Image: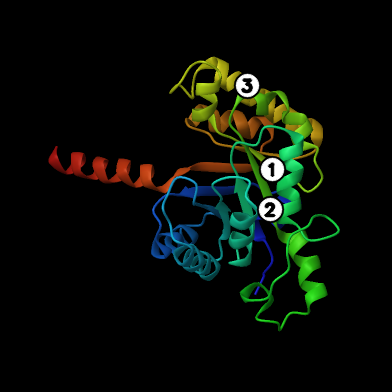
Amino acid sequence: MLTTNATKHKLWEGKAVYGLLNAVPSPWLVEMIGYAGYDFVILDTEHLSTNPESVEHMIRAAECAGITPLVRVPQPDVAAIAHALDSGAQGIVVPRVRNAAEARAVVNMARYAPQGERGITGGRTTGFGTLPLGRYLEQANREILVVLMIEDAEGLRNGEDIARVPGVDWLLEGAVDLSQSLGVPGEPLHPHVQEAIRGLAEACRTAGRHFCALPRTAEQLAHWRAWGAQAFLLGEDRSIMFRQLKAHLDNSKV
C-alpha cells in the first residue's frame, strides 16, 4: 500500500536527504542501501535491462528497509511511468528533459487529476482496494516525487521554465551527458560544465524547486552544502563497490 514519502517529508522539515543510484539490479542490494541509512534510492531502468518483476521486488525491498524508492525510466513514456508508479515507486526520475512542454507532459503522466492525467488502477498501491480510492488519489499526488534530469544545452537554457512547471519537485543534473552537449565530452568536471550546473541550481532556487546535487568530489559536496542544497545523490552503487573492492584487495597486497 502507498506509504508516506519519508524523503519528501524530511525536505519539508528543512532536513537534508541523501541517495544512491542503483545500477546493480538486486533486491538484496537495495535493502542493504536502505539499512546503510540512505534516504532514497534511484532504481535505474534507463541503462540496465531490468525486467519489470525485478523492479517490483526491488521496490518491496526498499519498503522493507525504510528507504524511498524512485525509478529512473528510459524516457518520458506513459507506459514506463505508469508501470513504475503502479509497482509502488514513490517517485520517478525522467532523463533528457529539454523544455517546459516536456516537463508538463511528464507531470500529466505521473499525477492524478486535477494535477495530471495518470490512469487509475488498483493493485498493491491501494492495498488491493483496501485504501479508499479518493483517499489514495489524494495521497499519491501528495507523496510522489517528480524528478527531471537536465542533460543537454537546450535543457539548461530552459531550466527555469522547466522548474516552474507545477507538479515538478526536483531538477537533477546529468554532468556526463551535459559535457557532450557543451563540447567537452567525457569531462563532467570541466569548468564550463560546472558553471552550467551552478546556473541550473540558481534556476531551481528562483523557481522555488529543489536542486538535487550530484557531488563528485569532497569540494563539490562542501560547495553544495554551503549553497543550501538539501538533496544529494552520492553516486552509483556499482562504481562505489568496485572502488571499495579494488582498494580492499590493493591494501591486502601491501
Q: Tag 3: residue type? A: Ala
Of 243 and 27, nearer the camera is: 27
Q: Residue at x 49, y 51 (%)?
A: 45
Residue matched to label 3: 196
Of 118 and 149, nearer the camera is: 118
* Contact? badges 2 and 1 (CB < 8 Å): yes
Residue matched to label 1: 170
Density class for disc 3 (Cα within 10 Å; few <14, some 14-19, many ≥20) is some
Q: CA distance from mark 1 to mark 3?
A: 17 Å
* Contact? badges 1 and 3 (CB < 8 Å): no
Q: CA distance from mark 2 to mark 1?
A: 8 Å
Q: Tag 1: residue type? A: Trp
Q: Residue at x 19, y 39 (%)?
A: 250
Measuring from the top left, give residue 129's x and y in whole percent: 70, 82
Of 72 and 8, nearer the camera is: 72
Q: Tag 2: residue type? A: Leu
Measuring from the top left, give residue 1's x and y in whole percent: 65, 75
Q: Which mark is residue 145?
A: 2
Of 133 and 30, nearer the camera is: 133
